[in-house]
Amino acid sequence: MCNYLRNLFFCEFQSDTAATAAMEVCSAVSGETLAVLDPDEFEGKSAKYVKQCLSAKIGITRFRQKLLADGFEVFALASVKVQLVILDFWPPDEEQDEQLISASSENDAVALEELLQQPRTPNVTDDTGKTALHHAAAYGHATPLQLLLEAQTNMLQTQLAMDGRLWTALEGHLDTVRLLVDGPTRFRR
């Protein structure tokens, strides 16, 4: 097993009837229940949606979650057992870090999503100390900004609480100002 795999969890639907089904997420090591998802949080939902629900409950961003049965994009009503692996970020890589910053500055949400899914840390900086979040905010790119916030970028590292909001407000990007004000709490548990 690769050294970047840190924790292994499994999810299992537990139910007496289909009407009361729930998804229980347990530690494969201790058996401890980490979260329970209600049927409306997983029935007929995509893997991305389920990971977002898990993120809100266990505090691990969806980009660091890997469902070993991830080939199933939609969860069925029938009992299913899936395994969840939480990955550490890949080590820093200058080329990949530059691509992440570039995707943030150029509003390339597809490339940014792919980089965050590896998973790459969202807290990379350019040679001037500006983070990917700074770049997305400065150019008013709401989708990359939202992805970076969901990936739990470190707002304090970038001092974005002050200067990022000011940059976007001065540039007239009110939608990104809203994300900077509301986003950090929306993507945290």
Image (cartoon, rainbow, N blue to C red):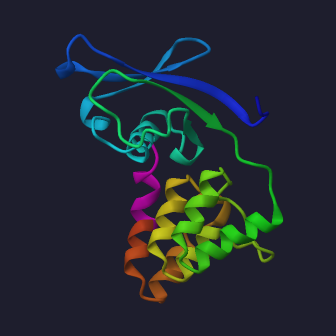
Looking at the image, residue 77 sits to the left or right of residue 98; the answer is: left
- Residue most toward the front? 71
Image spot of residue 149 (x, y percent):
51, 59
Quarter of the image holding residue 17? top left
Q: Is residue 132 above or below residue 107?
A: above
**Bounds of the magenta segment:** 180-189
Q: Is the residue 187 above or below the residue 160 in the image?
A: above
Residue 63 against residue 155 in the figure, above or below: above
Quick check: 2 left or right of 27? Answer: right
Residue 120 quadrant = bottom right
In percent of width and height, residue 14 lies at 33, 15
Indicate the position of residue 57 as horizontal and vertical percent values. Answer: 42, 34
Which residue is drawn at the image coordinates 50% and 33% (left, top)? 69
Quarter of the image where the N terminus is located: top right
Q: Is residue 181 within the magenta segment?
A: yes
Residue drawn where x is 31% and y is 32% of the image: 76
Q: Is residue 122 visible?
A: yes
Q: Main secondary structure of the magenta part?
A: helix
